[in-house]
Image (tube, rainbow, N blue to C red):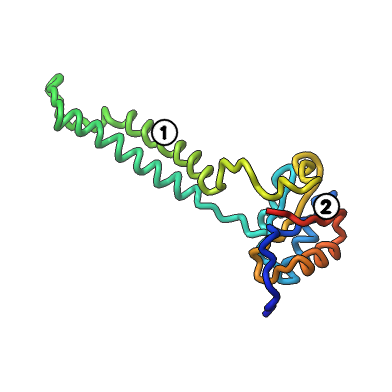
Amino acid sequence: MNLAPKDPEIYGVMAEYHTPRELLEAIHAAKDAGWKTMDAFTPYPIEEVFEELGHHHSKVPLIVLVGGIIGGIGGFFLQYWVSAIEYPINIGGRPFNSWPAFIPVTFECTILLAALSAVFGMFALNGLPQPYHPVFNVKGFALASRNRYFLLIEHRDPKFTREAARTFLSSTNAHEVSDVEP
């Protein structure tokens, strides 16, 4: 167990790589060395990176399912309440609860609430909008949207000290290692 004091003036230490293979090798090495609280930044989604970092489980499908069920039930009972309880009109001798006529609106309400749940659930789970993140202060981080790959070890990692993180990331053949100030 590392009893070294945490460094509260730093968000983490970040390393820059030129290829996705270098980034993946660094993630493997970091996991093997016991680092747990890491994040990666790439110009495009790389499935292997997300799998290695443990980002493969999402709550969005459950949120969409719950939103769709609520939308379907809400759409059906809104029509039932209007047609059978609040404003019943006998048209052509049909029953007030004419459920086959309710199917198109029920379906549309299901789709509408499922889609809205997907959008707002994704925003909430991703912490968006996020106009500021400490990695934006790193000098070369603008290259993450073009052609560079970054690995960040955060200060929340139980093993984290500035020196240990910098030494480790330097040993992974990083092209540049930077401190990330909050």
Of 123 and 132, nearer the camera is 132
Foreground tag (2 vs 1): 2
Tell me if mark 1 has few (under 14), some (14-19) or many (20+) residues whose alpha carbon lies within 10 angstroms of its own.
some
Q: Where is residue 104 drawn, in percent x and y?
A: 34, 29
State whether residue 9 is above or below residue 46.
below
Of 128 and 74, nearer the camera is 128
Residue type at mark 1: give it. Answer: Leu
State whether residue 1 is above or below residue 113.
below
Of 175 and 61, nearer the camera is 175
Q: Where is residue 91 drawn, in percent x and y?
A: 15, 20
Q: Which mark is residue 37?
A: none
Question: Which quadrant holds residue 49?
Answer: bottom right
Residue type at mark 2: give it. Answer: Tyr
Question: Which quadrant holds residue 90?
Answer: top left
Q: Is residue 85 left or right of residue 164?
A: left
Quick one: which residue is furthest to the bottom in this view? 1
